[in-house]
Amino acid sequence: MARVNLRQVEAFRAVMLSGSVTAAASIMGVTQPAVSRMLRDLQGALKMPLFEKKGSGLVPTAAGSALYTEVERSFHGLDRIVAAAEEIRTRRTGMLRVAALPALANGFMPRFAGTFLMERPNLNFSLFGVISPIVVDWVLNLQCDVGFAEVPIAHAGLPIVQMPALPRVAVAPEGHRLAEKQVITPEDFEGENFISLTHGSSSRHLIDNIFARHNVSRTLRVETALSEIMCGMVASGLGVAICDPFTAAEFSGRGVASRPFLPRIDFDFAAVFPPQRGPSPVATDFVNAFAEHVRRNVGSNF
């Protein structure tokens, strides 16, 4: 069998759609003789007639009608490929897997993701809330496309994008004496039951150093690895704490009062990407849009 080319198939389809060689030539932007030649070559290559002359027009044979069904199926598949390519180009399809520290994953990021995904209805999305060391491990092991972790990150060479730094806040039970203050300083914590993050975390180190420099003695009875647990304990009346602003905002109206804390202790975090490959376009869009969302919401209740 002689080789069939795409242009011949296009000519066949154009005739089937338009009902005449003249109209098909107009659709394809070629001359009528060119269409007739392509049809003749196609029928010769397939060794079967696809049309019969009827008056001044062409009528498809049974074989032609059957072939047209397959041609349309193929062209629709090609259209889907083109549409998929356009969606990929415009970052509206595919898969995005995100791992984020719990301070982000337990409220603020899901709300942002809802807006982000509304504009990308064909994008499949996964969000995992895990502590920062696990976020980094998952990024390194290609278990996610982008991670959000607290800095510093103990992996040299890991591509990162620094997110806007936000000040940590003081949190106390509603009705507590600290909740009556507009701004809270280290000295206000003197003698208070203080709920700490666990030893070894960079946040614990920063906060302890502030109180040490101000010679403030706290009663350290309770510690936890997660700020969500910390705020839950604050709400129960177990003590007071210094917390990231994301978690504090999630507990607003749930028994926890948050106030500005001075001197400022920043909550620093960054987006991290797998070093084995560059960030995907949709991952880059997600990170950039999330950073802008954080900037717009600094100082608000999120």
Image (cartoon, helix red, strand yellow):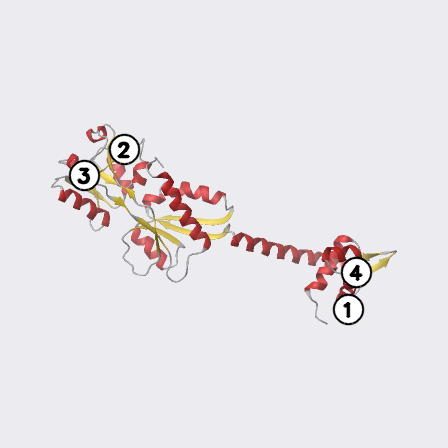
> Which residue position is annotated with label 1?
44
- Are the residues tagged 1 and 4 within 8 Å (C-beta)? no
**211 and 96: which one is in front?**
211
**Along the horizontal axis of the image, is 94 left or right of 205?**
right
What type is the residue that disc 4 sits on?
Gln
Name the N-terminal-most of marks 2 and 1.
1
Q: Residue at x 32, y 44 (%)?
A: 103
Q: Residue at x 52, y 54 (%)?
A: 89
- Are the residues tagged 3 and 1 within 8 Å (C-beta)? no
Q: Which mark is residue 227?
A: none
Marks 4, 2: nearer the viewer: 4
Name the N-terminal-most of marks 3 and 4.
4
Q: Which mark is residue 256?
A: 2
Name the N-terminal-most of marks 2 and 3.
3
Name the N-terminal-most of marks 4 and 2.
4
Q: Which mark is residue 32?
A: 4
Q: Is residue 233 above or below residue 97?
A: above
Name the N-terminal-most of marks 3 and 1.
1
